[in-house]
Amino acid sequence: MAKAPAAPKFIGSPIKRREDPKLLRGLARYVDDIDLPGTLHMAIVRSSFGRAGIRSVDINALTDLPGVVAVYTAADLEGVGPVPVSGLVPDARVPVQPVLANKEVRFAGEPVAAVICETRYGAADAAALVDVDFEPKEAVVDLEKALAPGAPKVHEDYDDNVAFNWELVGGDVEKGLAEADVIVKQKIVNGRVVPLALETRGVLASYDPGEEKLTLWSSTQVPHKLRTHIADQIGMAENRVRVITPEVGGGFGSKLNIYREEALAAYISRDLGRPVKWIESRSENFLATIHGRGQMGEVEMGLMKDGTLIALRYTVLADCGAYYQYLTVAIFTLTGLMIPGPYKLPNVEMKVTGVFTNKIATDAYRGAGRPEATYVLERIMDIAAAEIGMDPAEIRRKNFPAKSEFPFATAAGLSYDSGDYAGALDKALENAGYADMRREQVEARKEGRYLGIGLSTYVEVCGMGPSAALGGQGWESARVRVEPGGKVTVFSGASPHGQGQKTSFAQLVADGLGVDINNIEVIHGDTDTVPFGVGTFGSRGTVVGGSAVVIACDKVKEKMARYAAMKLEADASDIEFAGGKVYVRSAPEKSADFAEIAGLAYSAMELPPGTDPGLEETHFFEPPNFTFPFGAHVVLAEVDPATGDVKILRYVAVDDVGNQINPLLVAGQIHGGIAQGAGQALEEEILYDTGGQLINGSLMHYSLPKAGLFPRFELDHTTTPTDVNPLGAKGVGEAGTIGSTPAVVNAVVDALSPFGVRHLDMPVRPERIWRAAAAKGEQG
Amino acid sequence: MEVSLSINGEVRSFDVEPRTLLVHLLRDHAKLTGTHVACETSICGACTVLLDGQAVKSCTVLAVQADGCEVTTIEGFAEDGKLHPIQEQFWEKHGLQCGFCTPGMILTAYQLLERNPDPSEAEIRRGIDGNICRCTGYQHIVDAIQAAAVELGKK
């Protein structure tokens, strides 16, 4: 006999991933693992200068080279549209980014020609023989110099290197600063870093001349956006282009763009009638896949002596690179929206000047604008605390909105959905043993050891997001089909690439329909199969995509209940789903197998009144607001001023991401985020020389965090659900990255406080620490 | 050049250019695509395979150097279709997200546990220093290797 409906069986459980067996066996297929007969290989000839004219492109050396099929230069691609951009601000200058450079190259690594060859090695050989006659020009690298009068220009047809001006003003900062007891100021650089998905970008394009259809396998986060734009760029109907994302080896925002090589492969495959594959090398990934961050600014904050914050102004130069990628400009505006952070800050102002430089574009990298805001704010909070002699935890707690004040309207114009910021901080301090840590710090200093304690409290804007706020496409789609045999297939418009939504979405549907999780199949990343979707970025996969799944599931369930009601001679509103059965709530002895009712929906000769055959429903979920996860991170670090070495001794994090669908996956996201954020704090930074050459463009020269850099992360959480979506979930993809960067830097600066150090720019690598300590010497 | 080697227990011969890297022989000629290329500079370890039982980065081994050798790739690591305890524990502990580093990480973990069946956490972290994961922050990987050590110790 059926039982009363059980509490959620799968939602909230740390279920291991259904994605994993093929990944563990080496049987997963990433784009380079797809092997179509007759595939040609593409290699790209790139600019070796930051800025140069192109006098000529000589391909004569390739004439008799075996295996070379074709070489394309800009002249061969007339009619191919430029790289698409989105998320602009009013009056932004929008340079046209052609798929191949014509007369001028504007960053080292900019594509100049595409060589097509029968083999991969052959393509690389041939590309090396293309002789481009460059006329090197003075490059624009440094942001301040770029704006100096008489500076060379990235784009000759503009008056200067200003890409855009944008400001966000809430309240009256001038008045607030005038009223403040204390004003603190700091110049802060948030340098460029690489997202570095372990799988580089790659694309395989295959044009079928019979079907007149193009299939593109691409390592992308946004298959439908890619389809729309590629169709547009090469002049095909959208529904004659199919984009498939096979297994995708990480993205972190970098694959949320439409890149030149995708259009090139697509166009050339159609032109030659054969499949064309391009797999990015790691050095190309450094040169020509977007970088993250890239802000250089000054923050100024006014507060009262008791720690009450009054006003904050952030004036910043934003390093756009030579051309925009998909969301280059929008990322900087996200910094502005989050500049008040988790604090009651009645007056805020952010003024951004976007600057063109001879570099690859910056764009979304894990956190995308929010880590920059949190970093600036959390650094100036520590500086302010030191200035007024207040504990860093106290000044933060003092300025939090109370739990009862939510939804909380910020001066930057957002409405924070729900929060208990003091709750998260208190828990983090308790888990860290903060008071003991401070005592330990004092004792250690007596022994000549320099411990530092770093805090960060953050809130981020997630669950991207309402369409009106994003300039469209803020929704996500899902279709749920109950198959005639009772299995369930979920089609999602989101496009996970490591997050594990084949598992978490199955958890949602298993509970929704009361069926075993093993009966559910989740499909994503194929534009011919799934409903039109937006993609996975901005911590939206579960929050927006999962909500679409839940509502589509509810719609199917509602319809299925009518079939069950017909079979069980009951009212549809009295039908319950549990344990693979469908039964009558008021008479639980009346039940049927879930599969039997599923079959009925396809095979019944008489239908329930007003009901169509089949069990398949689609939903496009439009979120009414963003979500705002928050948390508090505490770092204990030891710094050796003699060597500049930093050792993270403890990492304590309390994150509140609302309801958790799968705590195991949530922990994984937070771990990974912390490591990436700490990587930027301690090690990672892209460096260009004055000529625009990228000088640390390989993993031999760019330091990525390795396992030995970290202690065990001590995670905990509070749970403050949101009412923005039916899951009550807030999103977790970026939280760790946002909390960790300032917490680590604050710990290092705190350790160096006996040396009078109040700020160091990232990465706080040994040389910078050693220099700062050596320059000042221990004071007092 | 002809190269003959045993891959996952099967002796196979290939005609390759002398400059062919072992990883490309495995991927492009032997069609075993579980071994990945991610950095091309032998830093990241995604291409790690076992060459005569030793974990090597196959992007910096020439195919001709592997002539006459025994190579184990991730495809040959599960025996009789049953996941190896290291694979099992990576699954249990959520030691992978995008999965791209996973084959190399698992084969490195194998060698680590061969050499030190009961490693401390610090020894594990040091032992996988030649393998980069950008997704997990390593903690669940460390957990997986620790748990695998326990499982293997029971045998």
Image (cartoon, coloured by chain):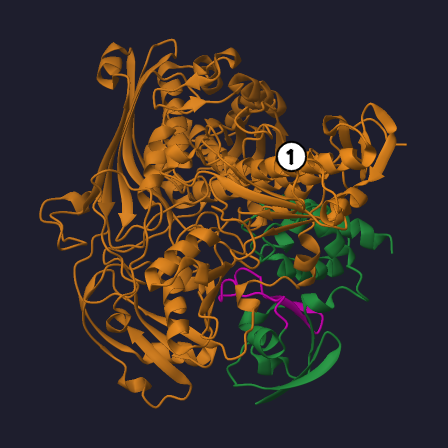
Chain colours: A orange, B green
Residue occupying image coordinates x 44% and y 70%: A212
Look at the image and say whether residue A452 sits in the magenta stretch. no
Give the camera-side residue of A408 and A242: A242
Q: Residues within 10 Å of mark 1 (few under 14, many from 20)?
A: some
Give the camera-side residue of A702 and A514: A514
Residue B96: percent from left, percent from top: 63, 51
Residues rendered magenta in the picture:
B32-55
Q: In the rendered view, does A253 fall on the left or right side of B153?
A: left
Q: Give the answer, above or below, for where A4 lies relative to A391.
A: below
Look at the image and say whether residue B42 sits in the magenta stretch. yes
Give the camera-side residue of A254 and A316: A254
Q: Give the answer, above or below, for where A660 lies relative to A30.
A: above
Quadrant housing residue A339 = top left
Residue B5: percent from left, percent from top: 68, 82
Q: Which residue is mark 1?
A: A554
Quadrant housing residue A770 = top left
The three-letter code of the residue at mark 1 reads Asp
The N terminus of chain A: image quadrant:
top right
